[in-house]
Amino acid sequence: MSSLGALRFHASVSLLGRAALRLDRLRTEHKLARMKSAGPHLGPPLMTSGWLKELISRHYLTGRYVRGVRKVAWVTSGAPVEHLKALGYYLMYPENHGAVCGIRRWGERQCLAAEDAGYSRDLCSYARTDFGTVLSGQTPVGRLPPPDLLVCCNNICQTVLYWYQVLAHHFQVPLVLIDTPFLYTEARPHMLAFVRKQIDAAVEVAERTAGRSLAPARLEEVMRLSHEAIGLWLKIMQTGRNRPAPITAFDEFIHMAPIVEMRGEESTVAYYRALLAELEERTRRGVGALQAERKRLLWDNLPIWYRLRPLSESLAARGVALVASTYTNAWGELVERIDPTRPLDSMAEVYLHPILNRGTGHKLATMARMLKEYQADGVLLHSDRSCKPYSVGQMDQQRRLAGELGAPALLLDADHNDPRAYSEEQAENRLQAFLEVLGA
Amino acid sequence: MTLAALGIDVGSTATKLVGVTAAGDIAWRRLAPTAPRIEAQAEALLAEARAQPGGERAPTVATGYGRKLVASATRALTEITCHARGVYRRTGRAGTLVDIGGQDSKVILIGAQGQVLHFVMNDKCAAGTGRFLEVTAGRLQLPVAEMGDMARAATAEVPISSTCTVFAESEIVSLLARGTPVEHVVRGLHRALVHRVTSLVRSLGPRPPYFLSGGVAHNAAVAAFLGEALGAPVERAEEPQLMGAYGAALSALEP
């Protein structure tokens, strides 16, 4: 680490940055406390939102100055990261950064920058957003630190294989690939052994790149913190089972950022404890995320990042609460597979089991279970042009949801990050017609 | 007859207005090509309806793409609900309603009580809609209203392989340049449109009887070819283009 870099990091991040962000959080909390509602038809805003903003801003501020101070790894959203955390890596999630670009309406321009370089418009819009960011050097968060290491796990899709090869070529850094066999049914022992072996190899590369060895006690500690945060996140989502639901999936789409990119950190655990306490208090007082909740729906697939607010408002105006989503659930449902005392074996098991690495029957069963647990009246299936693994099978799922499960389901054609694949009028028309069918 | 309720359907191609009696029968109707100034046109048509006996106090439900622009409507509902309501009132039966309008096509599953059970729509593509026929008619310099009869009378057809309206237009140019008779092309075009709609129907599973509404239902070839493809007759609703406005008016009758 250069002493100048370290000095700049501590001055900008540890001293000035932290103080400025804390001040901003206090200001936000003050503003939130005076707001009666988060929108014309929404309930009061979540007070912890100020804290969330501080966490996310600090994450990207750290990233801005971290080069040369800590090793940086860019990872896919489903990649094993606990060993990297334990080795002191700063983690960058291009998918999360993509979501930030989407929410801030930067998705299209980043995609265009990638398309200008020859990448096909049919490529995932997260990949295009990432390439656009890398090629243009522009991002709404200031600056992304270049990676020292890339870790790619294909438990979410196959596109990441090619995406990360492009990154490896561009940055000329080592790329670790963790190949998770697709689970058509149950995981077999040889599959677990296969993934475990790759995690061992990944640890070796990470140690070599970091120039230090992994301390088993520290890994257990990170695993324990990950476990705790995931357990809290699951409980947070489960408060949505109450009527009225104190939180909607729209809130979860925002509040999920730490569980993805800041797992294994004390501050994440503290933050989720506070959020859970706030939601439990709301439940006790009968405060809902909507002013008047009449119908409850389940969401499937990634959010439409650039339309979060209008969609949330449009549903709230009709008294429809999005009480749960298979997407946010994916970061909580595996909690029981984690055993902090067996970190590496647990990692192999957990990272084999994401919903996208399992058959479509598993997803249907998950939706059926969630419909019951959350007493939902129907399902919104976002048919995401950019996420084929998540969208495949939705037509059959729609038919079976409406048929044997008696839950009307709507297919909503969109794209999670590219607004050009979203037709506002058509989507709104379908949604309204669906709500009329539901009697909302 | 005294009008008890009004329904206005502001579609992409035509604006339809229907006035119904307290018993729910159509007593007054107007149909005009949708003008660019939707609000002004809708209000002018409504003013005419409200000048009829009872019209002044008649509640109004608006439907269609321009429904939100009808300022004086009591309520707005989507075409899905309205078409289903209108057609069910006419047929009194459960079944599958295919509605082919100017810019979209919908397949609606109607339940035993006339309720909408399920629906699907074409997505971001004009190939299964009235616009497909309009665009291709323009290229062939034929009046749209005559295309259906020409298609039915044709003795042969050429397959149109393009699934896109724009590419179908280029395909027509190539076919004509090769000397293919216009009637054969027209019949092929109808078949292509019906193919698109049939796959929408199949995605809901075969649930006869089948009904057809929307402006394209005036085209006899579409109904006939659709019946062939589905293996069951397709009943064309009377005044098919008015079913959305009719359903809207029926909804306006409800408290």
Image: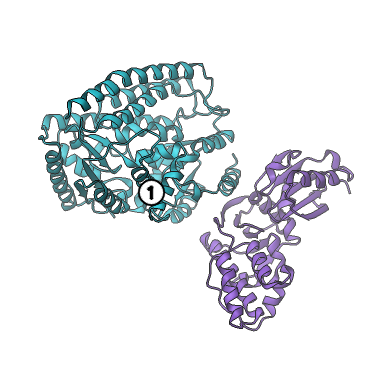
The residue under label 1 is: A128
Residue drawn at x 58%, y 45% as measured from the top left: A428
Instruction: Where is residue B129? Give x, y as percent.
Output: 62, 62
- In front here: A294 or A355? A355
Residue A438: image quadrant is: top right
Chain with purple colouring: B
Letter of the chain that mark 1 sits on in the rendering: A
Residue B137: image quadrant is: bottom right
Give the answer, above or below, for where A396 lies relative to A24.
below
Colour setup of the view:
by chain
Mark 1 neighbour density, 10 Å: few (under 14) some (14–19) many (20 or more): many
Q: Colour of chain A?
A: cyan
Give the quarter of the figure containing the C terminus of chain A: top right
Residue A358 seen in render: no
Residue B39: image quadrant is: top right
The amino acid marked with disc number 1 is Arg
Helix, strand or loop at disc 1?
helix
